[in-house]
């Protein structure tokens, strides 16, 4: 099963979802990231990115880091620290890295930076490897 078989309307990464984030990911050596500029419709308070969208960005960058390496995973746990306001309309870079792997469980770290490299939010997550067939809707 290919990723294209699963991304029909993924809110985070599908180009097909008209209201989605349409994240595209880049792997450059050890670095894995996506550049994203939050749109106005994703704000919470005026001019500030909604915390749920921030959580989605972090979840997506951690899961796709593994997915692009051929591992099919679901998020089992995620802890987020919101450090600073995340402005609407300014480019962000969302990163992730693998911290540890134990059998089917991956421990990940993700963070959101502004264009000056300041970390605005960070997360740790535990992602569980699953069989590709388990991800299809029945």
Image (spheres, rainbow, N blue to C red):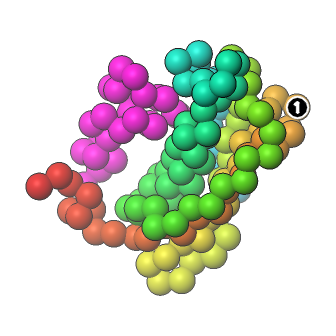
Left or right of 72 in this view: 92: right
Instruction: Note whether residue 18 is visible.
Output: yes
Q: Residue at x 88, y 31 (%)?
A: 116
Which residue is located at x 27 percent, y 62 percent? Answer: 132
Q: Residue furthest front?
A: 45
Element under label 1?
A: loop
Where residue 130 appears, x then y in whole percent?
Answer: 33, 69
Say which residue label 1 marks: 116
Q: Which picture quadrant has residue 84?
A: top right
Q: Is residue 129 above or below residue 137?
A: below
Q: Quadrant of residue 129?
A: bottom left
* Front-most of residues 43 and 128: 43
Residue in front for this viewpoint, 28 or 135: 135
Q: Residue at x 57, y 46 (%)?
A: 55
In the picture, measured across the screen, residue 117 lies left or right of residue 38, that is right
Q: Crowding near pointer 1: few (<14 within 10 Å), some, many (20+)?
A: few
Of the 4 image quadrants, the one containing the C terminus is bottom left
Residue 61, x across and y down, in percent: 57, 48
From the viewer's perspective, tell me whether residue 100 is left or right of residue 136: right
Q: Can the viewer see residue 71 in this picture?
A: no
Q: Give the vertical position of 79 relative to 115 (above or below).
A: below
Residue 23 falls inside the magenta stretch: yes
Give the image quarter of residue 7: top left
Instruction: Specify the quadrant that holds the N terminus.
Output: bottom left
Instruction: Please give the name of the residue rendered at 40% of the width and 61% of the height, measured from the top-left corner.
Output: 74
What is the span of residues highlighted in magenta in the rendered image?
A: 1-29
Relative to 129, residue 2 above or below: above
């Amino acid at each position: 099963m290919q990723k294209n078989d699963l991304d029909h309307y993924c809110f985070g990464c599908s180009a097909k979802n008209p209201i989605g984030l349409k994240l595209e990911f880049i792997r450059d050596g050890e670095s894995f990231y996506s550049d994203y500029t939050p749109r106005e419709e994703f704000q919470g308070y005026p001019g500030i990115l909604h915390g749920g969208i921030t959580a989605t960005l972090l979840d997506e960058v951690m899961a796709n880091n593994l997915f692009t390496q051929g591992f099919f995973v679901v998020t089992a746990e995620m802890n987020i620290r919101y450090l600073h306001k995340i402005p609407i309309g300014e480019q962000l870079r969302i990163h992730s890295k693998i911290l540890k792997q134990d059998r089917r469980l991956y421990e990940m770290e993700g963070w959101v930076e502004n264009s000056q490299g300041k970390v605005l939010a960070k997360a740790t997550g535990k992602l569980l490897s699953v069989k590709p067939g388990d991800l299809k809707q029945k």
